[in-house]
Amino acid sequence: MEVGFLGLGIMGKAMAANLLRHGFRVTVWNRTLAKCQELAALGATVGETPASVVSKCRYTIAMLSDPSAALSVVFDKDGVLEQIGSGKGYVDMSTVDAATSTKISEAVKQKGGAFLEAPVSGSKKPAEDGQLVILAAGDKPLYDGMVPAFDVLGKKSFFLGEIGNGAKMKLVVNMIMGSMMNALSEGLCLADKSGLSPQTLLDVLDLGAIANPMFKLKGPTMLQGSYNPAFPLKHQQKDMRLALALGDENAVAMPVSAAANEAFKKARSLGLGDQDFSAVYEVVKGAGGSGSGQA
Ligand SMILES: NC(=O)C1=CN([C@@H]2O[C@H](COP(=O)(O)OP(=O)(O)OC[C@H]3O[C@@H](n4cnc5c(N)ncnc54)[C@H](OP(=O)(O)O)[C@@H]3O)[C@@H](O)[C@H]2O)C=CC1
Ligand SMILES: O=CC(=O)O
């Protein structure tokens, strides 16, 4: 199977490499073209523009930072829209809001192409290991056509119906994750300031009803002040912001998420946006310093 891949950041690079490892023919493009070289060394073909990738491939996947990047790659000069058409599918796996996804879907469909949103749950390591959870919605025949690729990229894919449902599900999940990260940060601080061992707190948490892979993975590196980015904090804050907007639309009060968003915003203002999202711990500690170690 041949696929195009647009966006080779932390996630896109791992996902494209995974497809190559499993025998897919992959044509890659990235805004900073130099980042394509690593994939070319693994056997990828390099496309010069999003349009040239779409013209070559029946299916094109995108994994881009945010709504503005997702829109730019589709609508700008040399973008996806210039070459999408009948018989071609475009699959955006970026985390964006439903309005962004809908705008892209309508434009692609107007040109005769098919569109699927398919954001993912799971970070750098699950992307490397093909263990993502795929939250797809939109064109069902395109979803069916993508199953061989989704089987490589993920451990489970959900088809959630009409366009927007995948985006919304992803935002709800990340709203919960961002709030949990703040709760863990406060717990580690409270343990420390009240004379308890934060490491012992992690051990206790791991044995009880609120044990989870995120606390287990991030807790120890947070205690080391190590924030090598797997999931950049600026993206977590974007997800909290978009989830809060979804709450506004639906008149859902979300005071816990709103407080968590403030902490992520504060972290961004302190220059922690490119660090891992667990660096919000520095804000909760009141230190605001940048992490230096390796995750
Ligand atoms: N990291 C994670 O753990 C997870 C991330 N996600 C989501 O996946 C998406 C990608 O995340 P991640 O790989 O971590 O992000 P990165 O910041 O590592 O990569 C972002 C990618 O978007 C590209 N990009 C940014 N702005 C533009 C633009 N205006 N035009 C074209 N390309 C642009 C970047 O290109 P360039 O190299 O030129 O900067 C890069 O390829 C995000 O939506 C994120 O929320 C979802 C699940 C997990
Ligand atoms: O979006 C981030 C993730 O870990 O999932």
Image (spheres, helix red, strand yellow):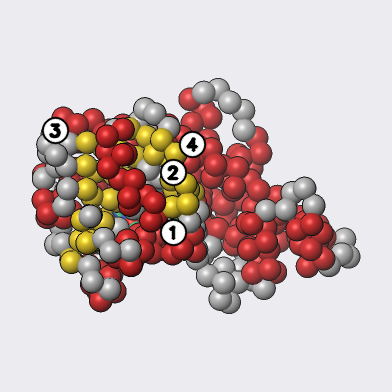
Q: Which numbered mark, 3 or 1, is in the foreground of this view?
A: 1
Q: Which numbered mark, 4 or 2, is in the foreground of this view?
A: 2
Looking at the image, is mark 4 or mark 3 earlier in the sequence? Answer: 3
State the residue at coordinates (57%, 52%). 264
What's the distance in space between the residues labelled 4 and 3, CA to CA? 27 Å
Q: Position of residue 230 (x, y in %)?
A: 50, 63
Looking at the image, is mark 4 or mark 2 earlier in the sequence? Answer: 2
- Label 4 sits on residue: 169
What's the distance in space between the residues labelled 3 and 1, CA to CA? 31 Å
State the residue at coordinates (48%, 25%). 249
What's the distance in space between the residues labelled 2 and 1, CA to CA? 12 Å
- Label 3 sits on residue: 112
* Three-letter amino acid code at the position of disc 3: Gly
What's the distance in space between the residues labelled 2 and 3, CA to CA? 25 Å
Q: Which numbered mark, 1 or 4, is in the foreground of this view?
A: 1
Look at the image and tell me in which quarter the C terminus lies.
bottom right
- Label 1 sits on residue: 130
The disc at residue 157 is 2
